[in-house]
Image (tube, grey):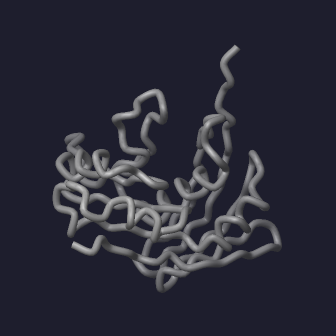
Amino acid sequence: MALTATIYNLDIQLADVDRNVYEELALRVACHPSESPEYLLARVLAYCLEYTEGIAFGRGISEPDDPPIAVRDLTGSLLVWIEIGSPDAARLHKASKAAPRVAVYTHKEPRTLLRQLEGEKIHRADALEIYAFDRGLIDGLVELLDRRTRLALSISDREIYATVGDVTVSGAVERHSLGT
């Protein structure tokens, strides 16, 4: 029998001071058994950091050619392709050809990802945006994650403050670029 995804219901009070975005989000996010809680949280945090009109989660592992998160305009045209984790160069090359903007949010060691991509053929590699979450933030949120979670998320100067109940964890989001 195949394992099924675990559904997480996240009520997020988003206050992104950097972009002047203040929203109440009710997210229903599927986590496939092959995905780690760290990946799930990186995906949710990336969604919040990129939140704008037209943003949506991809269809998941059932559609491997889809971006994990995409921003589309009203006509359905792809504006932003957002990857999570450690995508390979071929996937980023494809993404850069498909969308005017590509961003990668990683919960893993960013230097490892940068070394893996260095010297590889990636369309518009110099425009690729790579962001790394502070491991303390991700690890702290994993401890607080439940299938139903109410989360207050404040973002200021690329520093994230996440509060669940009476516990707050924080960490920076650092931008990296390929050495091209």
From the top left corner, tell me how far across and down residue 137 is, in percent: 65, 71
From the top left corner, tell me how far across and down residue 47 is, in percent: 47, 57
Residue 150, visible in the rendered structure = yes
From the top left corner, tell me how far across and down residue 150 is, in percent: 72, 58
From the top left corner, tell me how far across and down residue 60 is, in percent: 48, 35
The foreground one among 101 and 177 is 177
Q: Write down the quadrant of residue 135 in the picture.
A: bottom right
Q: Who's the residue at 58% across and 48% down the image?
A: 27
Residue 73, visible in the rendered structure = no
Q: Residue furthest right?
A: 166
Q: Is residue 92 left or right of residue 15?
A: left
Q: Does 100 appear above or below 135?
A: above
Q: Does 2 appear above or below 117?
A: above
The foreground one among 172 and 164 is 172
Q: Who's the residue at 61% across and 42% down the image?
A: 35
Q: Residue furthest top?
A: 1
Q: Who's the residue at 34% across and 35% down the image?
A: 65
Q: Write down the quadrant of residue 59 in the picture.
A: top left
Q: Write down the quadrant of residue 139 in the picture.
A: bottom right
The foreground one among 155 and 82 is 82
Q: Who's the residue at 45% across and 44% down the image?
A: 57
The N terminus lies in which quarter of the figure?
top right
The C terminus lies in which quarter of the figure?
bottom left
